[in-house]
Each structure stands twice: as structure tokens, then as C-alpha cells.
Image (spheres, rainbow, N blue to C red):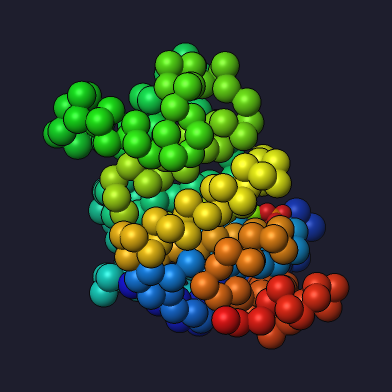
Amino acid sequence: MLELDALVKRYRGFGGETICALDGVSMTVTPGELIALYGPSGSGKTTLLAIVAALMRPDSGCVVVDGVDVVGLGEQDAARYRRLELGYVGQSLELIAGVPAIDNAALKLFDTRIGVREAHRRVVPLLDRLGLGQRLRHRGDQLSAGERQRVLIARALATDPKLVVADEPTGSLDTERSREVLTLLRELCEERGVAMLLATHDPQAAAFATRTRALLDGRLVDRLPDVPLAGLQER
Ligand SMILES: Nc1ncnc2c1ncn2[C@@H]1O[C@H](COP(=O)(O)OP(=O)(O)OP(=O)(O)O)[C@@H](O)[C@H]1O
Ligand SMILES: [Mg+2]
């Protein structure tokens, strides 16, 4: 479903120095698999996910999604890919402020031809499962950070994508809620055959994954120096 081959991405720092955010990353995520991409701050997780989401191009390397190289997509095709084929949960918790949770969650569906009623019919069960059944009419600015994060997860999943990439999707959730959301994501992977790549620096999140890959300074490594090995072993 998702194949990354030898991805390299460098940024230019303010002093003109080169920062190698990704240094030859290759991996595969198959349908039904939830891969935790575990790494410290600055290890390149967001860069990797942004490239998979075609929000950014790598300097070299390929990203193949369902047989299509997304690095080569033009602007319109990339936007279509993000809207319909990919579920992307970014690190930002921004919702459309004056708009109810239900419409914030249905946003991607409004770009299709299904109509508002049908869009709502599709997102309500997701919002329910995410514990937001009592918050459907709350506006974006009336929701807590954890609630906004869950609305964004619902938005990402609303189009029933076969590939989901999520950047710290439990970063604003307490331990209990975090477990619930991770359990749900894992279930969705299995039920719907979704391939999911989830960036995290929470060792707990790794416990919900099918496999965990560790990223350090832009490279996949077998283990991180300060993390108990058990959390990173492939299962
Ligand atoms: N636009 C940019 N310009 C220059 N350097 C950047 C830019 N974006 C990221 N970097 C650098 O690239 C490296 C990887 O950043 P990235 O955001 O991918 O890390 P991360 O693993 O997502 O970190 P975090 O856990 O804090 O979100 C970091 O050293 C960062 O400072
Ligand atoms: Mg990040």
C-alpha cells in the first residue's frame, strides 16, 4: 500500500548550514498494518509524513501509494490525493473556528457530491466512537484541545481512506483517552484494511502498533539509546 524508498530531505538552516532531516529512509506499510514511527523531537517524523502526504517533495527517493508515485503528482492531483485517498492527521489542532464539530469533521466530504445529510450520516458514527457524540454542535472554538484532535481524526477518516498518516494523534489526549483513540485506530486498520503510519514520541503508543520503527537523526535505527528495547521490538 505504501512504499518509501531511499527518501532524502535536507533543509537549509538560518546560518546557511544543511540539516539532513531524512537520510535514506525506506519502509513498507501494508493494508491492515499500523506502524508506529517512534522518534525524539527533531528526528524527522513530521518531514516524513509531510512527504507521504505530498505536502513537500523529497530531494530524492520515491513514495509509492497503491502503485502511484505521489512525489511526481502535480498540484491538483496532489490535492485530490490528500482529500480523497489519504487520511492525514497533522500536528496542528486548528479547526474552522465558527463551525460545528460535525461540519469540521465532514469537511472533506463537502468537496464531494454526496450532500450534507449523507456527509453527516457518515461522520456521526465516527465522532461517536471518538467520544464526541455529545459535542456534535459545539463550534471549533468551544472544544478542548483533545476534542479538537479527535475531530481532526474523524475528518481524516471520513472519506474511508486506505492510507492514513497521523502526526502525534494523541499528543493532546490524557492517558485514558489516548488508549481509546489508539485502540480505535488499530481496530479501523484491521476492520477496513487501512495502512497506517503514526508518528509518536509516546512509548505507550508503540504498544498499540503492529510494528514499531525507530527514527533517529533522519535514519531508521534498530534501537534508540534511551528507550527500553521492549518498546521497540518488532512484533
Ligand atoms: N522548514 C524547515 N527549515 C529548516 N529546518 C527544518 C524545517 N523543518 C524541519 N527542520 C529541521 O529538520 C529536522 C526534522 O524536523 P521534523 O519536524 O521532521 O522533526 P519531528 O521528528 O517531527 O520533531 P517533533 O517530534 O518535535 O515534531 C529538525 O532538526 C528540524 O529543526
Ligand atoms: Mg513533528
Residue beneath the point at 28% across and 28% down: 120
* Figure quadrant of residue 193: bottom left
Residue beneath the point at 57% across and 22% down: 143
**Residue 67, placed above or below residue 189:** below
Residue beneath the point at 40% across and 45% down: 156
For this rendering, which residue is in front, 82 or 201?
201
**Residue 21, placed above or below residue 222:** above
Give x and y (percent) for residue 30: 38, 75
Residue beneath the point at 17% across and 27% down: 115
For this rendering, which residue is in front, 205 or 112?
205
Inspect this view and state whether residue 47 appears: no
Residue 178 horizontal side relative to residue 217, left or right? left
In which quadrant of the rendered image does the C terminus lie?
Answer: bottom right
Give x and y (percent) for residue 201: 71, 59
In which quadrant of the rendered image does the N terminus lie?
Answer: bottom left
For this rendering, which residue is in front, 16 or 36?
36
